[in-house]
């Protein structure tokens, strides 16, 4: 529906990224990484989608910085 995610999804995703878990810009890969840790399928899918979007944004920012130099 939209790009609004709950604070819980955003907070827990940030914690996982800070722990050093390598996420991808592919939804299916992120879903498999989160597979066993999540209490529910809905929460897992929401987090995988959020992490995918964040990783795509980071990748795009990195490419923009490289093209400016």
Image (cartoon, rainbow, N blue to C red):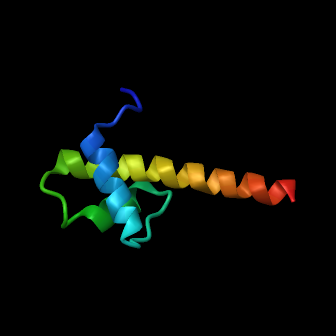
Q: Residue at x 39, y 46 (%)?
A: 50
Which residue lies most toward the right here? 69
Query: Picture quarter containing residue 27?
Result: bottom left
Which residue lies most toward the top here? 1
Is residue 41 toward the left or the right of residue 57 in the image?
Answer: left
Compared to residue 35, the image places residue 48 above or below, namely: above
Compared to residue 33, the image places residue 3 above or below, namely: above
Q: Residue at x 32, y 67 (%)?
A: 33
Query: Picture quarter containing residue 4?
Result: top left
**Residue 69: where, in percent of width, then height?**
87, 60
**Residue 14: where, in percent of width, then height?**
37, 56
Q: Residue at x 20, y 45 (%)?
A: 42
Residue 24 shows in the view: yes
Q: Residue at x 25, y 45 (%)?
A: 8
Front-lying residue, 45 or 15: 15
Query: Picture quarter containing residue 62?
Result: bottom right
**Residue 49: where, in percent of width, then height?**
38, 47
Q: How many marks?
A: 0
Front-lying residue, 69 or 34: 69
Compared to residue 12, the image places residue 22 above or below, namely: below
Front-lying residue, 43 or 18: 18
Is residue 31 toward the left or the right of residue 22 in the image?
Answer: left
Front-lying residue, 45 or 22: 22
- Quadrant in the picture for the N terminus: top left
């Amino acid at each position: 529906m939209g790009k609004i995610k709950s604070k819980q999804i955003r907070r827990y995703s940030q914690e996982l990224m800070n722990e050093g878990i390598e996420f991808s810009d592919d939804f299916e890969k992120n879903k498999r990484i989160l597979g066993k840790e999540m209490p529910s399928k809905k929460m897992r899918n929401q987090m995988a989608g959020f992490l995918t979007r964040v990783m795509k944004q980071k990748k795009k920012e990195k490419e923009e910085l490289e093209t400016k130099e």
